[in-house]
């Protein structure tokens, strides 16, 4: 089948890459993963039809002994496999050892990436699929149906994955905002109570001749410190809470993670800080409205 598709691609001057995909199991583990053999490894641009996101290590070299591979971060998370280790997977009863040379991200399913030639030499199978790259106006793709078991549109797959990642990121941002809202409520209550409880102290400062501007500067500094600390703690707790929630949802067959966006976290901290500082005029208004005589009487009593 692959030979017919390759001949068809060559006859139509269409770029192609062979792909070898097989189910396997980690040695000593019953959970299933996918062993994928690629002709070309690339992390950017149009150098390959399958682009990988490498977060640790290097791209594998073909022909090494044992074969060099990449594993996805889900495997690293669940099995503890690290770069530089020699591990093994089983294709039925056949054991294949390899050296982990890098870690990738973005895969939902657990995947080990081989050079196709290395994997083919181990399993005696050349290819199971063919990547094809043809222009949008090409109208002869219906011919593939006669020589294929199935056809998967890569762009549709990419769009679906991007949509899923956007939903995950939106979920994370929503949880962050929820954490900041809680921080704002607590902060507002703390500042209002702080102002009410410090009436006597502020009145004493005024009676002793402290200028309003000095009292205002003191209150501004306090509000700034409280807002900054509250915002940072709110952002940290919301991030940790979200990551804990996600970690409780992921499993071997469906792994993902959402990283915190420093810019969004900074915005949220800034919002809390702004609200805290904006409450300073409320305190100044209370100071201006104080009945100093009454406060002095309270102080005397």
Image (tube, grey):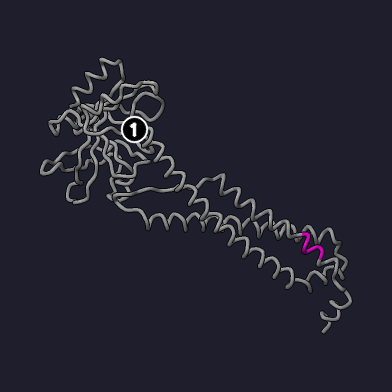
Say if residue 172 shows up in the picture.
yes
Image point 37% across, 56% down: which residue?
A: 249
**Quarter occupied by residue 184:** bottom right
Image point 38% across, 55% down: which residue?
A: 247
Residue 142 in the image: above or below residue 188: above
Considering every residue shown, the one lying at the far left of the view is 93
**Quarter occupied by residue 285:** bottom right
Q: Is residue 283 magenta?
A: yes
Say if residue 115 shows up in the picture.
no
**What stretch of residues is rendered in magenta?**
281-285
Which residue was labeled with disc 1?
153
92, 72: nearer the viewer = 92
Considering every residue shown, the one lying at the far bottom of the view is 301
171, 240: nearer the viewer = 171
**Residue 27: percent from left, percent from top:** 17, 47
Image point 12% across, 31% down: which residue?
A: 124
**Residue 224: percent from left, percent from top:** 69, 56
Quadrant including the C terminus: bottom right
């Amino acid at each position: 089948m692959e030979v017919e598709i390759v001949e068809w691609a060559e006859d139509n001057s269409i770029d192609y890459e062979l792909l070898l995909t097989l189910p396997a199991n980690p040695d000593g583990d019953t959970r299933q993963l996918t062993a994928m053999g690629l002709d070309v490894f690339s992390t950017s641009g149009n150098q390959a039809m399958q682009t990988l996101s490498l977060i640790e290590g290097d791209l594998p070299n073909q022909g090494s002994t044992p074969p060099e591979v990449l594993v996805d971060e889900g495997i690293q998370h669940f099995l503890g496999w690290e770069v530089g280790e020699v591990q093994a997977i089983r294709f039925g009863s056949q054991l294949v050892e390899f050296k982990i040379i890098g870690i990738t991200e973005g895969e939902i399913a657990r995947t080990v990436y081989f050079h196709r030639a290395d994997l083919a030499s181990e399993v005696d199978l050349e290819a199971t699929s063919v990547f094809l790259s043809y222009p949008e106006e090409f109208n002869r793709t219906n011919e593939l149906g006669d020589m294929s078991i199935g056809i998967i549109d890569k762009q549709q797959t990419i769009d679906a994955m991007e949509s899923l990642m956007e939903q995950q990121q939106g979920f994370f941002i929503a949880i962050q905002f929820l954490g900041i809202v809680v921080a704002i409520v607590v902060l507002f209550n703390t500042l209002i109570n702080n102002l009410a409880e410090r009436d006597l102290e502020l009145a004493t400062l005024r009676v002793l001749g402290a200028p309003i501007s000095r009292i205002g500067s003191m209150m501004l500094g306090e509000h700034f410190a409280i807002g900054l600390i509250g915002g940072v703690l709110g952002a940290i707790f919301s991030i940790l809470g979200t990551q804990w929630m996600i970690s409780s949802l992921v499993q071997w067959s469906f792994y993902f993670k959402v990283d915190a966006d420093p810019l969004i976290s900074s915005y949220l901290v800034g919002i809390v800080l702004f609200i805290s500082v904006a409450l300073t005029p409320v305190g100044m208004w209370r100071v201006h409205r104080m009945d100093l005589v009454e406060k002095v009487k309270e102080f005397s009593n």
